[in-house]
Amino acid sequence: MSDNFAWTKKDLLGLEYLSAGEITRILDTAASFKEVSTRDIKKVPALRGKTAVNLFYEPSTRTRVSFEVAQKRLSCDVVNMDMKASSVLKGETLADTGRNLEALKIDIFIIRHSYAGAANVLSKFVKGSVINAGDGKHEHPTQALLDIYTLREKFGKVKGLNVTIVGDIEHSRVARSNIWGLTKLGANVTLCAPPAILPKYADKFGVKVTSDIDEALKDAHAVNVLRMQFERDDLKAFPTPAQYFKTYAVTKERLKKCRPDIIVMHPGPMNRGLEISTDVADGKNSVILEQVTNGIAVRMAVLFLTSSAVRRGE
Ligand code: CP
């Protein structure tokens, strides 16, 4: 359990910028919020009178809806901007969009953007909380927090767990946030991908790196399967989807050689039959939909804590 220190960060831009104690505090706060979603009346007044805007410059299903559900469960007013019908199309900058929304007395800004660092930029121009909902290849902190929350819920701890991340690590903001969060909390992280898409930065984090999926899964308590982003130009040549499935997909056959209690995670959206087989995605080791449910409590915790820092003027 974390100490009950005063939260000082108004923004959540990435897990790189949080201490182990701060990550644990978010997880503990999420645990206390989880019960709210099981009530008949799924609402608490924690953010009554506050207004959040959801700025999704890139598509999203889980993250966008999960943030909106979390905001409503905290009694926060919500504005969902349609970025395709906004003045961004007339050339308005992110800074001006932020300043104008703040003039409309918005308190909380959730942003997903294709540019790495977009959330950091916005946070320089607004006094309210900025929460990164995924920025380019940089970070997706609330996804990693809900992944880590799910791990902790399943195994009762994070320290000492063997967590394998397999798939398109090079292009993945989910991988980066997971690596920061898991290593800070003392998990043993293994990255597994074809050599061409194993990131150059891997050594820096003290993680294990391999291109052998069976070796990567051998002692794993959990495998986090990432989507193969075949739409990326630099993945057009290698490997083909069929080759990838044969060599790297998490399948029932591969799971037979793993710990019986291994949990299978995926941030979504899944490519069934590409990085994961359907029998594994829907099988007894899968916690994929539990991750989605846990995302609500984790985002409630992040909204609550960051807003508490704004209230105190930090
Ligand atoms: N995990 C995730 O970010 O999914 P969405 O793109 O649907 O939000």
Image: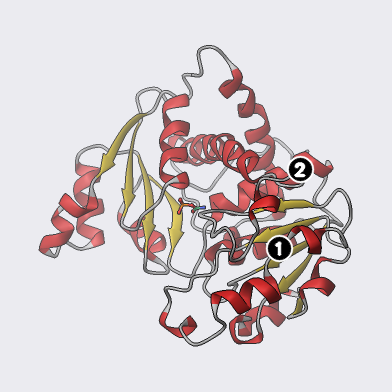
Local secondary structure at mark 1? loop
Q: Residue 236 location in percent, x, y?
A: 46, 83
Place residue 250 in its image quadrant. bottom right
Q: Residue 134 lies in what quarter of the image? A: bottom left
Residue 242, x across and y down, in percent:
59, 75
Q: Is residue 257 left or right of residue 121?
A: right
Q: Residues within 10 Å of mark 1 (few under 14, many from 20)?
A: many
241 or 219, which lies in front? 241
> What number of labels is visible?
2
Residue 240 placement (x, y as % from top left): 54, 80
- Name the amino acid, label 2: Lys
Which amino acid type is marked by label 1?
Answer: Val
* Residue for point 55% across, 64% down: 227
Residue beneath the point at 87% across and 66% down = 218
The answer to whether any part of residue 187 appears in the image is no
Instruction: Point out the residue furthest to the left here.
Output: 90
Which mark, residue 284? Answer: 2
Residues under numbered marks 2 and 1 in contact, where contact means CB atoms less than 8 Å apart: no
Image position of 151 (left or right of 101): right
Label 2, secondary structure: give it. Answer: loop
With 62 as the anchor, is 25 left or right in this view? Answer: right
The circle on residue 250 is 1
Q: Is residue 193 above or below residue 185?
A: below
Colouring mode (rainbow / by chain / secondary structure / one colour)? secondary structure
What residue is at 49 percent from the left and 81 percent from the top? 235
Q: Residue at x 34, y 58 (%)?
A: 58
- Mark sitting earlier along the chain (2/1): 1
